[in-house]
Image (cartoon, rainbow, N blue to C red):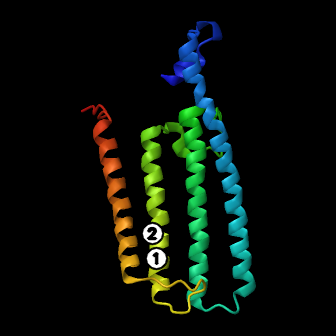
Amino acid sequence: MSQDRETLPAPARQKLRPLPAVIFGSRWLQLPLYLGLIVAQAVYVFLFLKELWHLVIHAVDFNEQQIMLVVLGLIDVVMISNLLMMVIVGGYETFVSRLKLGGHPDQPEWLDHVNASILKVKLAMAIIGISSIHLLRTFIEAGNVGSPDKTNYTETGIILQTVIHTVFILSAIGIAFIDRITQPLPDKAH
């Protein structure tokens, strides 16, 4: 349906009345938010390079477990960066304006059929991935008295982090289930 509106000649499009035009135009107030997320993405690139440099410089001094913890930190930064990209690209495309990539070879596959519902499920899955990395780091560091950041974990803290991770998983399942039952079933030709 949105394709039909985009292919209509300009005079065939109905001009909006003032109030609907203001309300519809207010979507552009989100633009500074997405630009701010791009700045946050740049900060994460800087953080990644800083941590990578730290790993390279101290690789000889670190034991295997310390290297694994730094690598998990790098993976965490990448996953958060991926989450930012999904929010920036998918959110802008869904809530502000079409990107009109015109079949660009680097266009993400999921962008063709992105909507608020699909974006929520993808974001929930990304948050679970990030939470998984944090939980794995916690488990590794909890058993390591001499961890690089000298963090001490209490049993209660580890249990709470595990419960929060489980809530993320259950929330994602709930979001996916609700999305599934609210979507119309495709016609099956027999």
**How many labels sit on residues?**
2
Residue that sits furthest to the left in the current view: 190
Which residue is drawn at the image coordinates 56% and 75% (left, top)?
72
Q: How crowded is the residue under tag 1: few (<14 C-alpha within 10 Å), some, or many (20+)? A: some
Vertical order, 36 against 167 (above or below): above
Rendered image: mark on residue 132: 2
For the C terminus, the image quarter is top left
In which quarter of the view is residue 15 placed?
Answer: top right
Vertical order, 179 against 25 (above or below): below
In which quarter of the view is residue 150 placed?
Answer: bottom right
In percent of width and height, residue 69 lies at 57, 81
Which residue is drawn at the image coordinates 59% and 27% (left, top)?
26
The residue that mark 1 highlights is 136
Q: How crowded is the residue under tag 2: few (<14 C-alpha within 10 Å), some, or many (20+)? A: some
Tell me the kind of residue under disc 1. Leu
Secondary structure found at label 2: helix
